[in-house]
């Protein structure tokens, strides 16, 4: 009897895993195989035009959020709020994707203690 229950539980578990995989084919942490193909094409393009212009780096919201959280842990909440305020944002989700790279740089500069250049509006 116990063996039948164990077999039923195993079958149920496998069915549940297959159901989840059917609805969520790839997790964000592990992109699906087709997503890797363009990356290889991009690498080939980079080697062709490596000397002509720098490659554009894609920054994600998660990378910015991680940097902001690290900044808050290292330098305090006020430092993190100040970086977001530069972009008129109260949270990372308020940032536009076009602002991610600059926001990430601002957060890492703030962690390193790099001072901002003086604003021209005061001159």
Image (cartoon, rainbow, N blue to C red):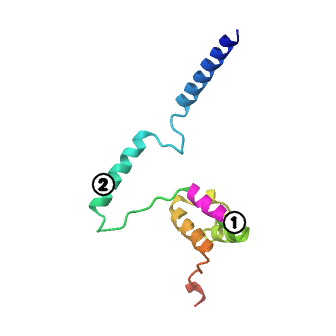
Instruction: Determine the residue positioned at 55% across, 34% down.
Output: 24
The answer to if 68 sits in the magenta stretch is yes
Which residue is tagged 1?
A: 72
In the image shown, does 64 or 119 lie closer to the viewer?
A: 64
Coordinates of residue 30 in the picture (x, y in percent) = 50, 43
Q: How many numbered tags mark residues here?
A: 2
Q: Secondary structure at mark 2?
A: helix
Quadrant location of the N terminus?
top right
Quadrant location of the C terminus?
bottom right
Q: Quadrant of residue 14?
A: top right
Q: Secondary structure at mark 1?
A: helix
In the image shown, does 10 or 117 lie closer to the viewer?
A: 10
* Horizontal side of residue 41 vs 86, given as left or right: left
Coordinates of residue 93 in the picture (x, y in percent) = 62, 56
Instruction: Determine the residue positioned at 50% across, 62% down.
Output: 98
Which residue is tagged 2?
A: 44
């Amino acid at each position: 009897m116990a063996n039948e229950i164990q077999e039923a539980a195993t079958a149920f578990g496998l069915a549940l895993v297959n159901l989840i995989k059917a609805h969520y084919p790839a997790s964000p942490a592990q992109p699906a195989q087709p997503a890797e193909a363009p990356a290889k094409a991009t690498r080939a393009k980079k080697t062709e035009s490596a000397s002509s212009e720098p490659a554009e780096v894609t920054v994600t919201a998660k990378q910015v959020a991680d940097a902001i959280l690290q900044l808050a842990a290292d330098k305090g909440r006020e430092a993190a709020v100040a970086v977001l305020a530069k972009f008129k944002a109260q949270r990372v989700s308020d940032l536009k994707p076009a602002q991610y790279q600059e926001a990430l740089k601002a957060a890492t500069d703030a962690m390193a203690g790099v001072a901002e250049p003086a604003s021209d509006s005061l001159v």
